């Protein structure tokens, strides 16, 4: 292939990406995600892709993740597991070619999440075997933002019901700031406030991906948890 033909092909690819309507992929992406997660996944709003970078950015609006089939017998007419107004994610291409997933940026706007665990251990946040003891393996997320999150956690195995709000961001301070995740609401009808904080997430690398079993441990610096629960006033 000559230089002229190569430039023509490159120009055609660039032109295709410029005019391509990424919303055409909402259906295929939703069907693929549904097959992988064993529940309905749909993008009801726009799908936007910004490909001109070694860390391309993807934005999905109106993301809906349904409940697993077994919840119908225990929660008839249950709301979806998650409804997210907007999710934006960046992914690094070069590590991905080596089989490593690195997300420089992940923003989740106005998520409404409903988590349920039954007494027998089945949990709707488990996407593999129902009673797997393996910790959840997450990609390396270097900056995480959660805006105006709503969370309902009904853990019938532990007898705990949390209903409240969740926000996460990096706050300014020092050289790189610190990561802070805040939750406030009610835990078994008592007022509950919690804060998980630590070093910025940019310390996380593919060789040390985030793993979560019970708590949240951001970055290499020691994180801390402050929680306060008190009985409601009458």
Image (cartoon, rainbow, N blue to C red):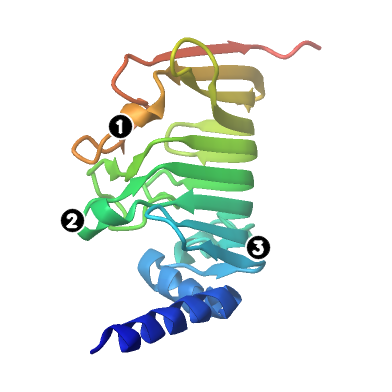
- Dot 2 or dot 3, earlier in sequence: 3
Question: In percent of the image, x 57 and y 80: which residue is there?
Answer: 24
**CB within 8 Å, label 2 to label 3:** no
Q: Which residue is mark 1?
A: 204
From the viewer's side, name the closer residue of 217 and 155.
Answer: 217
In this rendered view, identify the residue nearer to me: 131 or 4.
4
Q: CA distance from mark 1 to mark 3?
A: 40 Å
In front: label 2 or label 3: 2
Q: Helix or strand or loop: what does disc 3 sit on?
A: loop
Q: Which-is-in-front pick, marks 1 and 3?
A: 1
| Observer able to see residue 8 | yes
State the residue lying farthest toward the right.
234
Question: Residue 27 location in percent, x, y?
Answer: 54, 79
Nearer-N-terminus badge (2/1): 2
Task: Report how far apart the C-alphas of labels 2 and 3 lie in the structure.
Answer: 43 Å
Asked which secondary structure carries label 2, the reply is loop
Would you say residue 21 is visible in this rendering?
no
What label sits on residue 77 in the rendered view? 3
> Within 10 angstroms of label 1, few (less than 14), some, or many (20 or more) residues?
many
Please tell me whether residue 110 is drawn above or below residue 39 in the rendered image. above
Q: Are marks 1 and 3 in contact (CB under 8 Å)?
A: no
Q: Which residue is mark 2?
A: 98
Quadrant position of residue 136: top left
Residue 100 in percent (x, y) is at 23, 51
| Residue displayed at 48% across by 17% down | 177
Dividing the picture into quadrants, the one containing residue 96 is bottom left
Q: Is residue 32 left or right of residue 186?
A: left
Q: Nearer the viewer, residue 100 or 121?
A: 100
């Amino acid at each position: 292939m000559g230089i002229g033909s190569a430039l023509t092909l490159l120009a055609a690819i660039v032109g295709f990406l410029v005019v391509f309507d990424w919303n055409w992929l909402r259906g295929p992406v939703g069907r693929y995600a549904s097959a992988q997660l064993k529940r309905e996944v749909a993008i009801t709003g726009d799908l936007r892709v910004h490909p001109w970078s070694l860390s391309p950015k993807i934005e999905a609006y109106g993301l809906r993740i349904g409940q697993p089939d077994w919840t119908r017998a225990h929660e008839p007419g249950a709301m979806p597991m998650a409804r997210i107004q907007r999710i934006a994610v960046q992914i690094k291409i070069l590590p991905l070619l080596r089989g490593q997933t690195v997300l420089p940026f992940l923003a989740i706007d106005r998520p409404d999440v409903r988590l349920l665990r039954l007494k027998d251990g089945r949990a709707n946040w488990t996407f593999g075997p129902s009673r797997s003891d393996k910790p959840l393996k997450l990609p390396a997320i270097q900056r995480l933002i959660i805006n105006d999150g709503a969370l309902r956690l009904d853990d019938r195995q532990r007898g705990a019901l949390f209903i409240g709000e969740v926000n996460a961001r990096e706050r300014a301070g020092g050289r790189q700031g610190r990561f802070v995740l805040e939750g406030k609401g009610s835990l078994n009808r008592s007022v509950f406030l919690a804060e998980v904080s630590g070093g910025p997430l940019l310390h996380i690398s593919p060789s040390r991906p985030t793993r979560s079993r019970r708590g949240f441990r951001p970055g290499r610096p020691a994180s801390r948890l402050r929680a306060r629960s008190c009985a409601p006033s009458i």
